[in-house]
Image (tube, grey):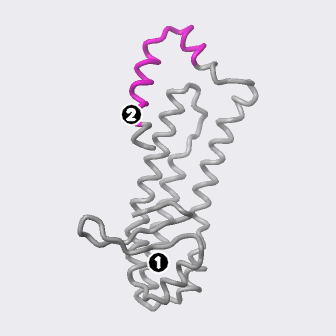
Amino acid sequence: MLQAVRTVHPALGMFYQSLNDEQKARFDAADRVDDQDWLQAPQDSAQSCADSASGIASTPLDQVERAVQPDGAQRLLLGDLKSAMSEAVELLKSSCPTTPAQTRVLRLEAVEQRLNALLRAVVVVQPTLEKFYVSLNDEQKERFNRLGFGSCVRVIRQGKSSSVCTVGGSERG
């Protein structure tokens, strides 16, 4: 999705810059069905953005701790995972728009920034999640996987072994 946005964004920007003021006004107004809905949508989007960042923060790592019952070394890795999750939340919160984007080009730019932040958040969390998961024994892995909000499996790609972790049904790895 990020690649699609990166492909479309420059072309849309060049197209938009080629328009005169009247054409820009018509282009910007084309997707406004109702002015009230249009004014509310960016506010809803900003709230949704903040809510999704908070949703990650509420991942029940204490539930993981109770289910997995980590030993001392694993508890340190779980602490690292908590720190990584906090860092990811801050990355996501910082990517939330503070003002509504008034044009399609600016809205696409905001989408690109958000997708970049999501990617950075995954890059922050995934290695620590993998380290924690790899440290678990088979019984602990089974209990972790039964929690239902994510799991990790060992895969071999191009001759290299690694863990692929899923969180909420989305592959991370």
Residue 79: image tag = 1
**Residue shown at the point (57%, 17%) measured from the top left:** 27
- Residue 59 location, x and y as percent? 59, 69
- Residue 75 location, x and y as percent? 46, 85
Q: Main secondary structure of the magenta part?
A: helix
Q: For the N terminus, which image quadrant?
A: top left
Boundaries of the magenta span: 6-27
Reply yes or no: does residue 41 show up in magenta. no
Tell me whether the residue at label 2 lies in contact with that at label 1, contact meaning CB atoms closer than 8 angstroms: no
In the image, what residue type sits under mark 1? Gly
Residue 154: image tag = none
2, 22: nearer the viewer: 2
Q: Is residue 126 left or right of residue 29?
A: left
Q: Which residue is mark 2?
A: 7
Q: For the C terminus, which image quadrant?
A: bottom left
- Residue 7 location, x and y as percent? 38, 33
Q: Is residue 1 above or below residue 30?
A: below
- Residue 113 location, x and y as percent? 46, 42
How many other residues sit within 10 Å of disc 1, few (<14), some (14-19) or many (≥20)? Answer: some
85, 167: nearer the viewer: 167
**Residue shown at the point (39%, 41%) measured from the top left:** 3
Q: Residue furthest left?
A: 159
Find numbered disc 2 in the image and state the secondary structure of the residue it sits on. helix
21, 151: nearer the viewer: 151
Q: Is residue 17 above or below residue 80?
A: above
Q: Earlier in the sequence, mark 2 or mark 1?
A: 2
In the image, what residue type sits under mark 2? Thr
Q: Name the mark nearer the viewer: 2 or 1.
A: 2
Q: Is residue 75 left or right of residue 53?
A: left
- CA–CA distance in space, label 2 to label 1: 39 Å
